[in-house]
Amino acid sequence: MWKPVHVFAFKRKFDFLGQRRTALILSTLINIVSIAAVFTFGLNFGIDFRGGIAIQAKAKDGTAELDQLRNTVGALGVGEVSLQEFGDPSTVLIRVQRQEGDAQCVAGAQRVMQKRAGQGWLVKPGAAGTGDVEFTSPTPLDAANWRDAVSRAGLTLQERQLPRGSTNTARIDMSIEQRAEWCQQVAIKQVEDAIGANYEMRGTESVGPKIGDELMRSGIWAVIATMAAIAIYVWVRFEWQFAVGALIAMLHDVISTIGIFVLFQLDFSLTALAAVLTIAGYSINDTVVVFDRVRENMRRYKKMPLVDLLNQSINETLSRTLMTSATVFVAVAALVLFGGPVLQSFSVAMLWGVIVGTYSSVWVACAGLVYLGLRSDSLRPADDKADKTDKTEKAGA
Amino acid sequence: MLNLPRWQTLVIAGITLLSVLFALPNLLPASVLQHLPQWYATSRINLGLDLRGGAHFLLEADLRSVLNERLTNLSDSVRAELRKQQVPFKDVTVEPGKALIVNLRNEASRAKAIEAIRAFDPSLAVSGTGDTIRLAYSEQELTRRKKEVIDQSIEILRRRVDETGTLEPTITRQGDERILLQVPGIKDTTDLKRKINQTAKLTFHLVNEDIAVTGQNIPQTLPPTTFLVPTREGMQELRRTNPKAWEDIQTANPRLSPEQICRRYQPQCLPVLKRVVVGGEDLDDSKATFEQQQGGRPIISFTFNSAGGRAFCAATRANIGKRLAIQLDGEIISAPVVQSAICGGSGIITGSFTTQQTQEQSLLLRSGALPATLTIIQESTVGADLGADAIQAGTVAALVGTALVAIFMFVAYGPVFGGFANLAMLVNLLMVFAGMSILGASLTLPGIAGLVLTVGMAVDSNVLIYERVREEKALGRSAFSSLATGYERAMSAIIDANLTTLIAGVLLFGFGSGPIRGFATTLSLGLLTSMFSSTIFTRMLLAVWVRWRRPTELVI
């Protein structure tokens, strides 16, 4: 049987809060840079929030030719297109911007019909101000055949939208919004037709304009609601200085995580949002451990200056703070290394969250307690003779 | 603290054992599962579409147009009614998406007009002054109608998408006006879209009463105007008594005509005239209701549009006392006897129905046409091999993550304490599996990420306890007392840490959609169960261990 190894047992006591000014500057800098980066470079929102199309395609033989693909798909008139290698050199993720349902889309629909239903098909936009689309078939079709034909271009129809009897043209009534949603389908079909010969479509995702806007809204609400709920919880459980300290630490973690997304231009998708919320929840974990000890020590050492007391508490809990972070760190590291390309941005963000969460529990949350003047009124200066740290504490408060 | 009464030990062990039992069907190989009872072997975690491969559509129903159409129809009826009641009016207009405006010629006839319209549709709220009458559906009524449209669309979609009953689609309502359609194992969405677009063929025919068809006694030749159609009950009977034949009919290629089915398999059939009295495209609505008099028997009411109403009126007037067969996709769903001429566009079907039967039948009558346009607003298709890759990546990440955490705990806390923490971690994983099996939740790729994350977080509780024990031991406490105090003092931090992360998990579940909910599920479930496994379960293990080994010094 082997003996346990005290992985993070340090003989020396560190003067963590002695560095609090440096930490304050560093943290403020990180956060300001993060916020500024969001406004200047912008978050690289995924299609979940922006609307659009993502197609994962795999080259049928060998490597995916990114440049060639970019030219082919870019020439389709589907708007902005971005490509990236995804997982391995043969797989590529093609992202197409969200479709607005303009004339280009109708022209695209005609190409799709000609390719899929036969030459001779025509598709034209209807009256201006509506989203109507007029289909013309080379031969007269009855309602059932119309349905069959237009579903090739990804249209789902209601019976009464179809012509009665046997006709050559069918005008499909749509609102402008409905046409924009349908144009997503048209764009997918266009990409499939353009590259289908050499690439296999492994998966397709399309988020219409409406859902994109909604998810963005509900995502923002989710972040606000989660932080508020955690804030209320911490408020109820701790004295106000602790609560404020923990919340500043949480904000620090969340903002800097978003900064990481901008810095590495990681895809900010729903999974990324999940990472941000989880980091908000996890950020409190380490903080709570230290705070628990601070409270305990405050009862035990009534006369110890605050900075010393905090330093002692941090040192006492240091090994467990590092151990708990380490266990989560190794688990997340496994996700980064083996979780595959889909989880990549989530895992990288989580990894950062674990590191920054540990840092912030010491240098943001505890340092915050000093600046917030915890217990400064209950400390009688007369008792703390020749105490330098006490003066700095007052200055800070 | 460590002196657990025997019953507590038993309860904790019992809960653990139950979780293992519930989780087991997910872990056993197929060869073992087939020897187990089916209800047990099949209670496994569903894989989400991102792992399993398949298509996912979010469809939005255009309820505004449905409402406008209803209002337009209503305006026709109101006009007719006012003329009939000889109320002078200027015009009846539709305020799109909102209301119907009736402009009367003089204020004097206001009361009479309102009375006439009210009798026509009592659910309309009346407002307006002078010679204008504003008719609108109340919020409540609108909500009810919206719900009806969505429910109806769901039923029709189910029928269309899963004709053969083998696709296992999941069709659920999402919010007020959306439907989520998930079909596992499908890659070609064009085919699926064609199915969504496909309309059931509903037609009304007169029964040829001159020909008697009883059981197997089918006349060899029929008049050219007549053909045989199996009844729905007959087909259901056949499915029960001769499943093989039913299967053959479903898979026959080319599809058998109704008459071929009748002659080959002899289900109960009816001879009907080929001429179509009226088609399903002219049927506006149908619902299950109750008769006004005669004890309120369950009946089915239906409404035609004007063209259908005229045709139906003429046909029923000429055929009182005869049966009118309603054919849906080659089956007769009902053949009521015409009691009287049905004019004015609406009628009822009476018979000895149960409420359930009337609901079923009215639903079938409505399945001709989708009540609202469904627009695809979100779509995702995952190929089976992409799903398989995701499963593989997820599994490897989970195994490596668990192994790394386990090694770490062994190294840091030794074979005994590290072992207990790792055992608790495994129990936690099993409990999450069990919980998901019981809840019927789906495991997605982000869900696997959540699982890996909880593995790392679950042992945190043990770390907090053990570190406290080390501290207490360093203060010179006895083995027993260090353990007891360690558990006691670490508890509040454990609860705080888990609850704050749980808050994030639960809110994410509420706001998120699709695969993200999978993440929220495993994370929240994992944190909840870890509070049991990492604290209560390990405390039990330690209590038993302490009693057995009576350690004087802790190796921690």
Image (tube, rainbow, N blue to C red):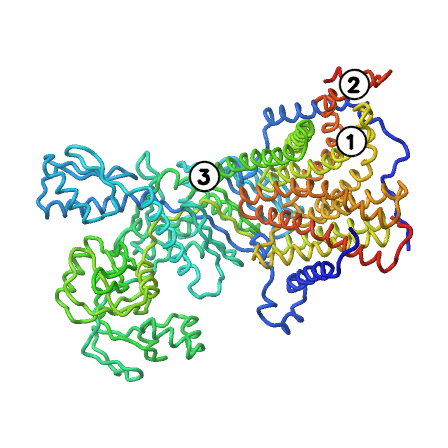
In the rendered view, does B286 fall on the left or right side of B518?
A: left
Q: Residues within 10 Å of mark 2 (few under 14, many from 20)?
A: few
| Vertical comparison of B299 with B503: above or below | below
| Vertical comparison of B532 with B339: above or below | above
Q: Amino acid at mark 1?
A: Arg
In the rendered view, does A44 fall on the left or right side of A379?
A: left
Whether labels 3 and 2 share one chain: yes
The residue furthest bottom is B217
Whether labels 1 and 3 share one chain: yes
* Host chain of mark 1: A
Quadrant in which residue A393 is drawn: top right
Label number found at residue B434? none
Q: Amino acid at mark 2?
A: Arg
Rendering coords of residue A366 (x, y %)? 74, 28
Between label 1 and label 3, give the one nearer the viewer.
1
Marks 1 and 2, how far apart at CA: 16 Å
Q: Amino acid at mark 3?
A: Lys
Mark positioned earlier in the residue sequence (1 or 3) = 3
Instruction: Provide the secondary structure element on which disc 2 rests.
Output: loop
Whether labels 1 and 2 share one chain: yes
Label number found at residue A299? 1
Marks 1 and 2 close (CB-CB < 8 Å): no
The residue identified by callout 3 is A210
Identify the residue at image location x=82%, y=48%. Answer: B483
* Host chain of mark 2: A
Q: Residues within 10 Å of mark 1 (few under 14, many from 20)?
A: few
Mark positioned earlier in the residue sequence (1 or 2) = 1
Instruction: Provide the secondary structure element on which disc 3 rests.
Output: helix
Mark positioned earlier in the residue sequence (3 or 2) = 3
